[in-house]
Amino acid sequence: MTRSFITRAAIVTIAASLPAAAARAQARPSEPVRLTLADAVQRAVEHNPDLAIVRLDTESEAARVGESRGAFTPVFSTTAGHSRAVTPPTTALLGDTGVDVRDWFSSTGVRQRVPWGAGTWSISWDTARSTTDNPFTSFDPNLQSGIQLAYSQPLLRDRRIDQSRAQYIIAKRNHDNSELRFQESVVQTVATVKQAYWTLEAAIANVGVQQRSLELAQELARQNRIRVDAGQIPPLDLVQSEAEIAQRRENLIQARTTAEDAEDRLRRLIMDPSDDEFWKAHIDPTEQAPLVQVAPDVDGAVARAVSGRSDLTRAQHDLENAKTNVDLSRNQTLPDIRVETSYRGNGLAGHQLVRTGDFPGTIIGARDRGFGDALGQAFGTDYPSWSFGVTVSYPLGRSYEEASLARAEVERRQAAERIASLRLETAESVRRAARQVQSTAERVEAARAGATLAEQRYNDEQRRYDVGLSTTFLVTQAQRDLLQAQVNLLQTTLDHQSALVSFEAVQQAPAPGSNDAIAIRGAEIVPLPTSTPRGLFRTGGGQ
């Protein structure tokens, strides 16, 4: 029975069993770290590296929100270049001489996808300087400038929701979910720390119980030795008592090992890994396990858990993400109808040749018009160009978008069913945790009564032995029963504290290792280039 407590405690602290050997090899500091339960929890929240990992995940999701918002960032672009084109003659008037045209040109513009209606706008300014040896040209060099405004607006597909807005909406919900996951990790870590604290406190108390049991066995052996020397009892009784001392010394060694393992487990959860005294600090838990609490309010606990537990909130966000995907997929099945409009102002200047007579005319003079003239014309109404039109496209037959809609609908139903399943699972886990609180409380009362009766029996048997009315075997058995009863009381008290911790935590977050809600996160954030609206013009018609 004694080994049962040791085995169960060792299982709880198995994760720290390997570092324990190194910890025991280190010298203990003279002053132990006296630790309350609240101090242990605070240290864990501040120093636990597992929490730091989850906290970094929230920062990663925040970066994803920034990535998705980048789809609405204005895009600046500029182009500058030089070109030369020599074309063969296309008219007899040019003879065999080709036409040599040299251009210096530049274009600068800004375009943006607006965060509502999925429209895109652009504004650009372009300039060019051209020289040519074409004898028919009127400007050499000529200076051109143009200002263009354009806007494209979808009317059906993409108007209410498009890929860029869907990514942004889902990324924000995923960021909220990452914050909830962090809260879950805090709740789970706090619960683990509390359980480790009470496990260490029980393990230390068990060392005291085993030490006291060893002392009782040593006292009985001392009395037996006196009686054997006086010829009152046979030497076999002394051998029996000394064998019992050896067994209880082994139990004490195991109890100390279990306590050190429990200490390492708590140390791993709360100590700062960068502290040089990490493995040397001896932890002294100063709080005692509180008295058994009254029966919990099961119905109230279930209601609180179902209405506000973090995994259910995350599952609801996942359902909203699935609905967003359905809305996007349904919208993409609509015809792509867009209104395209643009306006451009043009300007022309340079070294103008003045001609008279029939074509190609005789050059009678020249006049120079500067770049400022071309720029003024571009901003004026001298040479306007504008367009307004509608584009329509729609797939014939079953499309990729229709298949995507069917898949999104299945995922939405799956997410909704998952919420229903989680509600049942939450209610069941809370009710089970409440039953554990109640049953362990009753076990504590029974174990306490058993320990009291075992102590009374041992005292009676010891008094009978002192007056010669009992035997070494009966006293030894009474000591064993007392030891087992005290160990049982420690174990049931620890079970009750663990049940209380679990009952408190399960109302706020699922237990570690529970099945997580299905995360409908959508695709990874992908860059969505902003298109440049140019307006509509007849093919081959130019601007």
Image (cartoon, rainbow, N blue to C red):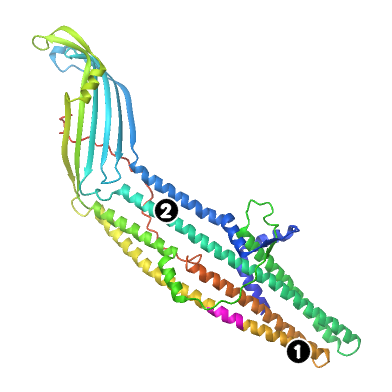
In which quadrant of the rendered view does residue 476 lie? bottom right
- Can residue 225 be seen here? The reply is yes
- Can residue 473 be seen here? The reply is no
Alpha-carbon span between mark 1 and mark 2: 67 Å
Q: Pinpoint residue 219: horizontal percent, then vertical percent.
A: 82, 80
Is disc 1 surrounded by few (<14), some (14 to 19) or many (20+) residues within 10 Å? some
> Does residue 330 lie above or below 464 as drawn?
above
Q: Pinpoint residue 446: horizontal percent, then vertical percent.
A: 61, 84
Q: Residue at left 16%, top 23%?
A: 382
Residue 311: say if magenta. Answer: no
In which quadrant of the rendered view does residue 277 lie? bottom right
* Left or right: where 473 falls relative to 495: right
* Left or right: where 496 falls relative to 332: right
The kind of residue on which mark 1 rests is: Asp
Local SS, label 2: helix
Q: Which residue is mark 1?
A: 460
Local SS, label 1: helix
The kind of residue on which mark 2 rests is: His
> Does residue 71 lie above or below 95 as drawn?
below
Chain part drawn in magenta = 438-445
- Work out which residue is located at the far top of the displayed protein and give it: 364
> Does residue 5 lie above or below 66 as drawn?
below
Q: Pinpoint residue 428: horizontal percent, then vertical percent.
A: 44, 74
Q: Which label number is shown at residue 513?
A: none
Q: Residue at left 35%, top 50%?
A: 167
* Left or right: where 471 falls relative to 540: right
Q: Earlier in the sequence, mark 1 or mark 2?
A: 2
Q: Which label number is shown at residue 175?
A: 2
Name the magenta segment's main secondary structure.
helix
